[in-house]
Amino acid sequence: MTTLAQQFWTMDVPAGLTAVFAALACGVLGSFLVLRKQALMGDAISHAVLPGIVIAFLLTGSRATLPVLVGAAVAGVLTVVLVEALCRLARVEAQASMGVVFSLLFALGVILVRRTADRVDLDPDCVLYGQLETIFWERLTGPVALLDPTVWADAPHQLASTGAIALLSVAAVTILFKELRIAAFDPGLATAQGFRAGVLHYVLMVLVACAVVASFEAVGSILVVAMLVCPAASARLLTDRLSSHVWLSALISAASAAAGYVIAGFGPAAVARLTGWDIAGEALSASGMIAATSGLVLAAAIFLAPSHGVVARAIRRRRLRARIDREDLLASLFRDEEQHRPSDAAVFRAATVRAARRLGQVDFEPGGTRIRLTESGRTEARRLIRAHRLWEGYLVDELGARPDQVHRTATELEHVTDAAMDRELAPPGAERRDQSGKPVPPRDS
Amino acid sequence: MSLTDTSISFPPWSQVFDVLAFRQGYNTSAVVLGTTLLGLAAGTVGVFTLLRRRALMGDVLAHATLPGIALAFLAATALGMEGRSLPVLLLGAAATAVLAAAAVQAVTRHTRLTEDTAMAAALSVFFGVGVVLLMVIARMPVGNQGGLKTFILGQTAAMTGRDTMLIGGLALAAFVVTGLVYKELRLVCFDAGYARARGWPVGALDLLMMALVVTITVVGLQAVGLVLVIALVIIPPTAARFWTSQLGVMLPVSAAIGAISGYLGAAVSALIPRLPTGAIIVLTAGAVFIVSMLAAPHRGLLATALRALALRRRTAEHHVLRALFESRETGAPPSLRELRGIGGAVARLDRRGLLTGRGASMALTARGLSQAAQITRNHRLWEQFLVDYAELAPSHVDFSADRVEHVLTPDLVAELEAAAAARGRLPTPAGAELIPSVHPLRSPDAGGGP
């Protein structure tokens, strides 16, 4: 077995899996944070765990995982409680109370670290960046080794803690899904149905605190925020259903973590080999790269999401404008026909005329610049003029608008009138004429 | 090993005085002056971000400076300049911070994502990119990169006199600009919709506000670090908010809290070794915040708690008075047992001469009788109003009336009287006589309320 393959199993597999587990937990929980407009709570918690870690460290005098995790979890839950208390009791605005609480706790942590630097081998930097690179599973030499139970005893604790929180988050969200859904969208209804939305909020926040705590050691506290928010925000743009939102968010999160880890670990070497540049082909900060990857995914979702993306919305707007222009052209030609006026193609935008010709709704009179409606164009125009004049009649008769002021409104509404609205606007049987006495064209059967 | 053996050697008083009076050498004085100006400007700008409900925007911008610092270092080194030069690094920091602010604004406007989501995403992604870039720099063969990380937690020891001049000057400029656009920012903070309708460039003013926050953030990087500079923008205005509801008062109070925190924090960390300046400044501001939160006269927690206590006491007294009054009407003994926690109320009423006796012989004095009549009347007026106008069943109004009767002002009572008179419920139109209850009064044999 080559050393490279060995390194893959002893270092990359446990570190990559740790990142994926952390991402999974954050992705599942983050979708609720994003929906409840609590996205910044992850940021607050991730800063505020620092004093908890230091104090646990000082009290036990060891870097053992459990006390540090407990200390951090206590600080995390304390953050949530204090933020809520400031909001409710002291009526401080939500963002401000988060800012006050976490910056004070972080400052306390920084001072504790600095004052005890000679005894505490703890770098605030590693809380911020995480140390994915130090995870090492010595006895995992290959997939076969997993079958040996003694190998498991030596699994890195980061892998265990992130795996546990991933399992816990997925289980909690699966079991409490119905309650969380109601609480996310309608806390009042949730309370009326007999479970306390406030308690559920705390359950969610405690889970977030645990996820932040279990993950910060591996991916760093700021980067936990990326995993809590970016995948959930991407999912928010891709789907409207809560259940698919949650699982999509988890999937995107885990995929970003895996991809970010691979890019950080193998990217520099690959670039060096491909380009021949003399750069050090060592791994980059995996946690930073994971955050950057999840940001890239979010940027892609912002632009390319099928119905909520910026591009899709721009295309929809353009199409709508083109249709309205074309319909205005048809209606104008219809009015010209009514008045026996010749129509000049030059007054319309060339693109609009081209589109209408392509649809076979207008054609040019032989050998001239005059355009006229085809039969199918006239049918469409009749529908529009009918809608326009029905709306004018409705606005005057039913809403009491002044007859000389309804034309503009009717011009806007005619483009969005479908057959059902037409039926409601037109009283059965009565043959209508509009305000200036022009006939309302009959409905096409 | 314990927390307590981190002994802090306290400096002599003469040295304390020297530092506070700017007489402890040029460098220390410059740092203290610089952080004071920083606190002043941050306290001023922070008021507007707090009122615009964007308090954490400073946090986002601060984290977003990291890639800018790294990129500026890379660019300057590539051009053969001194990579550690403060103006270059601050320029880079400001550039990516502005980019982050623009990204947040664009995402909020053009997608369905909410502002807090956009903020958290921008914060973490920019910081992640910054971490990667810092690592790239650390791998580069160029030297002199060691100091870049000091921006994350701040290090006043790394500040030179010239740096301090730059920092103080920028902070002062932000302070002055805020003063110049005071009126416009005030309007945007309180009613953005109205401002837009009146033709104010709300988007541009928001950007200007963000630019001011960026300036503060960038200025504060070296003194307090990018994680904690946010505290200077949030804590002073939040503390000031407890003391006043007027912007004109809040601004100077917030600026003063910021300046004092900067001044004291820098002084303390200059006097006592191994105390990080940024954290001390933040904790000083935090102390002011906690005092404000507890002790502020109207919005403070102590004042609020006292008001709540007073209301609870008044409510209990009203309950006792009404129970005694109604027992006179029905002839049954007062059903005081149902009222919990009235022991203190009875004693207080006794002290004020409104009732005499205890237990079965408890009775209202003449003064107590007239007050009890008034209270009972208010209760019944409100019940009558609920029955007549809110169309509640007479058997259901007692509880609701119970919660409102204690906070009825004379104006409201007058309106209730008018409403009752309109329905012919008052015995004489303008009379102050008692009106009958809309539901049967509690009687001992019924055992409970209606």
Image (cartoon, helix red, strand yellow):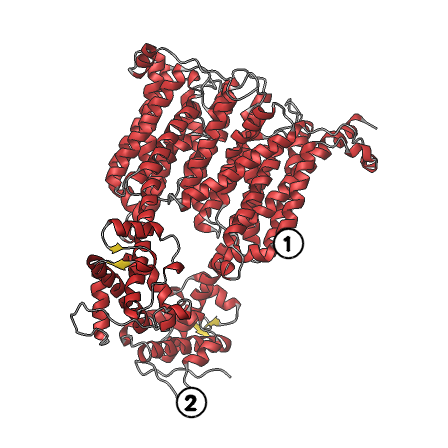
Q: Contact, CB < 8 Å: mark 2 with mark 1?
A: no
Camera-side residue of A330 and A280: A280
**Which residue has dot 2 on it?**
A429
| Residue B325 point in image, percent of width and height | 28, 64
Q: In the picture shown, does residue A35 fall above or below B416?
A: above
Asked where in the image residue B216 lies, by quadrant, the reply is top left
Residue found at the far front of this picture: B361
Q: Is residue B450 above or below residue B111?
A: below
- The residue wearing badge 1 is A175
Rendered position, B313 above or below A127: below
Mark nearest the camera among 2 and 1 is 1
Residue A320 appears in view = yes
Residue A77 lies, in percent from the top left, at 53, 40
In what element is the residue under mark 1? helix
Nearer-the-camera pick, A59 or B74: A59
Count of picture labels: 2
| Type of amino acid at the residue the image marks with label 1 | Ile
Q: Is residue B305 left or right of residue A283?
A: left
